[in-house]
Image (cartoon, helix red, strand yellow):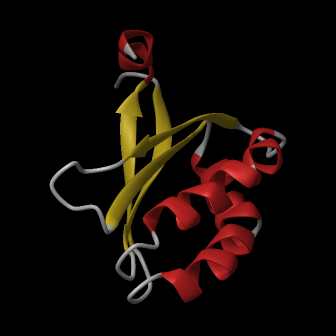
Amino acid sequence: MASMVYARMTTWKWKPGKRAEAVKIVEDHLEDIRRSKGFRGLITMLPSDDPNSAMFMAIWDSQEDLVASQKGVYTMISTKALPLAEGPPSLKNVEIPRALLALI
């Protein structure tokens, strides 16, 4: 089996007109995210056909680091962003072959 990294895909549906404000919350905490053990990267995806949604993929070295981030920096950011959302985000944890990260 190929060596893996672990990612959390978080999909948010924002209240109308709140996406930019919500993305800024994430941007304001980039240093906190970067200091988290095992953090590898964050990809922000903003659908051009839906100005009220956003997806974030946070990539971690290990499953343990991903779980620890859920209890730490993820909760801190989500708590601040939730008032701008129509509801809680959907979460999906995935594995990514480490070799594919070189393609990004």
Query: Image quadrant of residue 60?
Result: top right
Residue 28, position in %: x, y? Answer: 75, 53
Q: Which residue is at the far front? A: 17
Q: Is residue 28 left or right of residue 102?
A: right
Residue 42, position in %: x, y? Answer: 55, 39
> In which quadrant will I find the C terminus?
top left
Q: Is residue 24 left or right of residue 15?
A: right
- Closer to us: 62 or 90: 90
Query: Image quadrant of residue 93?
Result: bottom left
| Residue beneath the point at 49% across and 42% down | 6
Q: Is residue 11 above or below residue 83?
A: above
| Residue beneath the point at 81% across and 42% down | 31
Q: Is residue 50 left or right of residue 2?
A: left
| Residue beneath the point at 36% across and 11% down | 103
Residue 48, position in %: x, y? Answer: 21, 48
- Closer to us: 49 or 40: 49
Q: How many marks?
A: 0
Q: Is residue 102 above or below residue 98?
A: above
